Amino acid sequence: MKTPFCLFLCLLSISIQSQTLLQPDRVFDGEKMHGNWVVLVEGNSIVYAGKASDVTLPNNTKTIALKGMTLMPGLIEGHSHLLLHPYNETSWNDQVLKESPIERAIRGTVYAKSTLMAGVTSTRDLGSEGAGYTDVYLKRTIDEGIIPGPRMLVAGPAIVATGAYGPKGFHDGVKVPLGAEPASGVDEVIKTVRRQMGNGADFIKIYADYRWTPGADSEPTFLQEEIDAMVATATSAGKYAVAHASTPEGMRRAIKGGVETIEHGAGGTLEIFKLMKEKGVALCPTLAAGDAITQYQGWKKGSEPEPQRIKNKRKSFKLALESGVDIVFGGDVGVFTHGKNYRELELMVDYGMKPLAVLKSATSLNAKVFHLNNLGKLQKGFLADIIAVEGNPAKDISAMRNVKFVMKDGEVYKNE
């Protein structure tokens, strides 16, 4: 039992807990840009965000001057794979078949740190791609403070229709590890969802369409009743489902089934995007993944005309903007280099989105869509996940390449 004197010391240490004042040139609070603002942090929480002239500072306040910088909420990456690395280093097939989950976990610890240092303080990881529940354990080691990294929401193995995923190209007598967990029929998909949630998945990822044979066009995979059953099973457990979908019919089935986000959506039509808007389903377009893969396949960006794949993606993104559907920031990073998450932000602007809308997408909108209720804004009572970048990204989105300050949960990880 603690003595009264020990209790007094404990209470005293709490009462004099130091505060940190962050003093930038400007503040993006998750919604708007402000001049002459400051943010005051105590412990892991924001206790003040507003005009510098209106803040009252205790005697033990530490000030961090961020001259020339924009302060903003930590980025929330909407589509990552911390257990993958760029396909021009090692093909997806070889990562699944030849890199053990142990090797991929070790790589993941490096990529987690790179991600955090790039200003991404939270990330939604969209499937372990053949590494089982390694993403669950990577998340746990970050949460326990063993390694530095972003807050993670993880999907576990993800769910595919039997026969519709890879690696492929082997004769029928060869059994190979798959990049996701196959299931078929209402009873089996329900069991699969429950198993994945029980093993630690925060949400369920469904492949609503895919290539049935290598090189073929994507086609719908699960029947409507199978998608309905998976979503109902997840939501009844207080979780949710998202869908990989690029074809109009695959997207339609996923939307009707009640998923919360559509990943990729390259073949989306205006009708489909309007349906998403109506149903409150957000789009995660993953522009940077297609851009990277097309370059891996030989496109010399900047010196050659855009291939049809890129033209099609521009067209679908324009339709999505026209429809008013929520567009969330998520680049499918892992296909390209971890820590270069800014590539998606730059492409969102290049494809027609306003820089301030892109910043909102990467902060407050993603927090809302992903149910991160105390993140995504610089506001009293919110968690102190805060970054600073050199320059003004609302005027030049490439400023997001220059992250100079990173605070996660009140702890400073980077201050250059």
Image: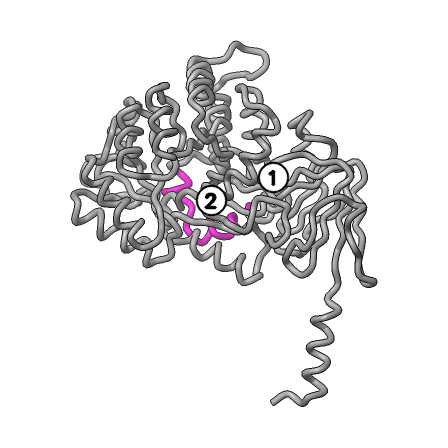
Q: Quick one: quadrant of the N terminus?
A: bottom right
How far across and how far down the image is residue 221, in percent?
23, 33
The outermost residue toward the top is 305
Task: Confirm whether the magenta stretch covers residue 412.
Answer: no
The picture quadrant where one finds residue 158 is top left
The mark tally for this picture is 2
Is residue 179 something one can see in this rendering? no
- Quarter of the image that includes the C terminus: top right
Classify residue 23 as left or right of residue 364: right
Q: Mark 2 and mark 1: span between their CA atoms?
A: 18 Å
Q: Amino acid at mark 2?
A: Arg
Write the residue at 54% across / 63% down. Answer: 144
Instruction: Judge whether 168 appears above or below 17 on screen.
Output: above
Which residue in the protein does label 1 denote?
30
Q: Residues within 10 Å of mark 1 (few under 14, many from 20)?
A: many
Q: Determine whether the residue tagged by mark 1 lies in a helix, strand or loop.
A: loop
Does residue 13 appear left or right of residue 321 in this picture? right
- Residue toward you, 116 or 300: 116
Residue at screen point 79% across, 50% down: 64
Disc 1 residue type (three-letter): Gly
As drawn, is 200 to the left or to the right of 407? left
| Residue 212 placement (x, y as % from top left) | 24, 29
Which region is colored magenta?
A: 94-111
- The numbered dot on residue 124 is 2
- SS type, badge 2: strand
- How many other residues sit within 10 Å of disc 2, few (<14), some (14-19) or many (≥20)? many
Q: Is residue 171 visible?
A: yes
User: Which is nearer the N-term, disc 2 or disc 1?
Assistant: 1
Q: Magenta span: helix, strand or loop, mainly?
A: helix
Residue at image x 49%, y 30%? 88
Seen at 64% across and 58% down, the residue is 44
Q: Position of residue 401 (x, y in %)?
A: 66, 33
